[in-house]
Image (cartoon, helix red, strand yellow):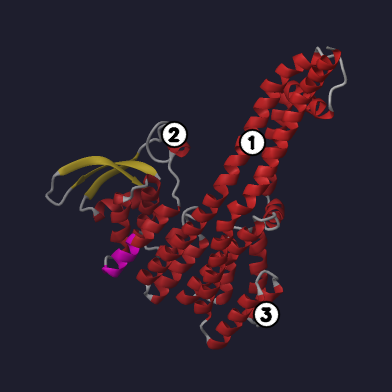
Amino acid sequence: MAIFAYRGRNTQGALIEGNIEAANAGAAATRLSNDGVIPLAIEEQAEKIFGGGDSAFDRLFKRKVDLPDLIMFSRQMYSLSRAGVPILRAFVNLADSAANPELGKILRIVSDDLASGQNLATAMAKHETIFSSFYVSMVHVGENTGRLDIVFMQLADHLERDLETRKRIASAFRYPTFVLIAISVAIAIINIMVIPAFAKIFASFHTQLPWATRVLLGTSHFFVTYWPLLSVAIIAGAFSWRRYIATEKGRLFWDSKKLRIPMIGDIVHRALLGRFARTFATMSRAGVPLTTALNVISRVVDNAFVGEKVRGMSVGIERGESITRNAAATNMFSPLVLQMLAVGEETGAIDELLDEVADFYDREVDYDLKRLSDRIEPIMIMFVGALVLILALGVFLPMWDMASAARGGG
């Protein structure tokens, strides 16, 4: 996006001047004409470091377009499309009233592309960080079938369910994450500040210390002596790990391992399969071909391992095999789900049965999330108890020995 200074005349013939944001001079002229301004001169302004367009300052502090913004936009588009408002006018109005400036900027670019003759799906596809392949494919089907209002309603409903699932998962993991952070901070403080104070006292005993005390002193000495190297190693390891999982091979490896994490992996797996089924049902109901739908889902399912399995299903269907047979070959679905898919293929109501599958997985995820805290809490208590026991033995055993020796000597 660039900033253009313009001079023009309004419908009353008065001379007006100002700035307008657009992708190019032609798009700026189109926007001015739509607003009832006859452009006389349009000149692009130089980008500034602080302010205007996609400046360095804006890129650093701009607000992301998140899922709630996209849900609200989809709801608004459904209402405007249902009311018969032309798409171009709807985008212009939403761009001017968008609560998120970044979304407003993207909608202005899309409206400029629409004004230049592009269709909506093509204009949206240029902004893949905002509109996913799934979103664009649904809009494409809506344009071709003349059911854009229905498509936007389905998109809003789908995104709302997806957001609700993410919130439930994040809420379930909040407690164990907080406990682990608190334990880590406590261990660091004890090793760096508390144990060294006791080490001076223990050094004056001139006797063999208990094993628990020696472990504490050795661990504390390691932390205090090598904490700079340890910090560098942790930062370098985290950076290297992020670089590795950003690669195709690394992401495939990590996404497959995430599904095998005790207690957590099964919940993540079920949530992913629920998202797959819900997305597949939505695209099937909208009339997207099966192979196209599966290829799109493989890119938006948010797990490279599951995405690879879904692409395998697409290849099998292209060979003429049934959905149920390909789903069974992935080893991802339970026999009950496979039976429901088979019934859906036989009756021609695959979208309805996929919705049932998604509801089935959502119920299981809800149940597992409610039990997650109950299952993790005993493990946390045992871990904290073991830590407290080692600290107590390490600190108090030497003192107890010295007190016993003093009483015996007396």
Dominant secondary structure (helix, strand or loop) of the stretch shown in magenta: helix
What mark, if any, has residue 183 been given in the picture?
Answer: 1
Labels 2, 1: front one:
1
- Residue nearest the viewer, comparing 219 with 136: 219
Q: Residue at x 55, y 64 (%)?
A: 275
Q: Position of residue 66 (x, y in %)?
A: 45, 51
Q: Secondary structure at mark 3?
A: helix
Q: Which residue bears the numbered disc 3?
A: 325
Q: Mark 2 touching mark 1, by CB under 8 A? A: no
Q: Secondary structure at mark 1?
A: helix
What's under tag 3, amino acid-wise? Arg
When asked about the image quadrant of residue 94, the answer is: bottom left
Q: Which residues are magenta?
A: 76-84
Labels 2, 3: front one:
3
Is the N terminus in the top left, top right, bottom left or bottom right quadrant? top left
Answer above or below: position of 265 versus 225.
below
Q: Position of residue 314 (x, y in %)?
A: 63, 73
Q: Position of residue 370 (x, y in %)?
A: 55, 57
Circle 3 crowding by C-alpha within 10 Å: few under 14, some 14–19, many from 20:
some
**Whole-number angstrom distance, CA of label 2 to CA of label 1:** 38 Å
What's under tag 1, amino acid-wise? Ile
What mark, if any, has residue 34 been given in the picture?
Answer: none
281 horizontally vs 335: left or right: left
The answer to which of marks 3 and 1 sits earlier in the sequence is 1
Q: Which residue bears the numbered disc 2?
A: 57
Circle 1 crowding by C-alpha within 10 Å: few under 14, some 14–19, many from 20:
some
- Residue nearest the viewer, comparing 280 with 319: 280
Outermost residue, bottom side: 346
Circle 2 crowding by C-alpha within 10 Å: few under 14, some 14–19, many from 20:
some
The answer to which of marks 2 and 1 sits earlier in the sequence is 2
**Whole-number angstrom distance, CA of label 3 to CA of label 1:** 48 Å
